[in-house]
Image (cartoon, rainbow, N blue to C red):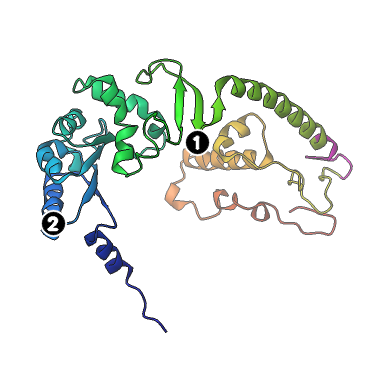
Amino acid sequence: MPPQPDYELQTLAEILEGKRIVHCHSYRQDEIAMLIRVADDFKFQIGTFQHVLEGYKVADEIARHGAGASSFSDWWAYKMEVMDAIPWNGQMLWKAGVVTSFNSDSDELARHMNTEASKAVRYGGLSREEAIKFVTLNPAKQLRIDAMCGSLEPGKDADFVIWSADPLSVYARCMQTWVDGVRQFDVETDRIMRARDAQTRTALIALATSEWGKSGGGDSGGGKGRSGRRGAAPGMPDADTPPVDDANIGNDARSGGSLLARLRFNQRDRLMEMVRSGIDPAAIRPGECGCDQMDSWSAIFEVTGGEGGVR
């Protein structure tokens, strides 16, 4: 059999041969300076320092090595490594000649990188043209894909957004999104589709409600309080019973929602009443409050007879 490949050594070999570019997660100046020295000693290239929140302290060293910097715009003081972060970091790196960009670890904030770019105007006084490059052309350069995307030029992939106002403004709305020259989103088309889908949704809810009423959900009225399904306990869910919304269980219980919601809520009240009556909570034996039985219908009801009697 052929020998097992060593992927770690293979990766290191590709780095030394210049086939693989290093992108380094970093925060503090000492770790940034350390890796630059290692790269200089072994003669390999660092592509970008990610996060690089103390990059402003060693901006000249980063520029001399030729690495880029992809920073947070204004996140700091949430752990020890970022205590010295400042909002002028991006501007100071850019001024030193470093190809600088902004990024975010938040999937929500990543949807609004245009307003993150505007912080480079507020903190550092960059021109609006240079600030927008922090989230367009400069990241493409750092990833070595600027020949395909990152700016509006002939021959590129035609990935762009049309805004209702200045892209750096918090009031700007996305009007159209184009990917590879194909319009993927349009606000007017979206408005029409929302109205269409709202009508469809209303019709489906009405249909589901009428079918639920016909299927004997809850008590069927014909079997001494039993549900429509033979052998099921009163109020037990049939196959068509919609699931319980645990997130709104208290609201469901107060408003007379599903049986399971009411049972859970009542058991919670039962425990509180036992404590209020003077019983030491430590003296309540497992199972007395019933809260350990709420996760399973079979634990709530014991079906004992062929006719679905409940004990």
Magenta residues, as a range? 213-223
Image side of residue 241 versus residue 35, left or right: right
x and y percentages locating residue 107 in the rendered image: 41, 37
- Tell me what residue is drawn at x 50 percent, y 34 percent: 179
222 inside magenta stretch: yes
Mark 2 burial class by Cα count in 10 Å: few <14, some 14-19, many 20+:
few
Instruction: State which quadrant residue 199 falls in.
Output: top right
- Going from the N terminus, do you reach mark 1 or mark 2 first? 2
- Tell me what residue is drawn at x 73 percent, y 46 percent: 237
Mark 1 burial class by Cα count in 10 Å: few <14, some 14-19, many 20+:
few
Q: Which residue is mark 2?
A: 38
Q: Nearer the viewer, residue 50 or 109?
A: 50
Q: Quadrant of the N terminus?
A: bottom left
Q: Which residue is mark 1?
A: 180
Q: Quadrant of the C terminus?
A: bottom right
As displayed, is residue 249 above or below residue 117? Answer: below
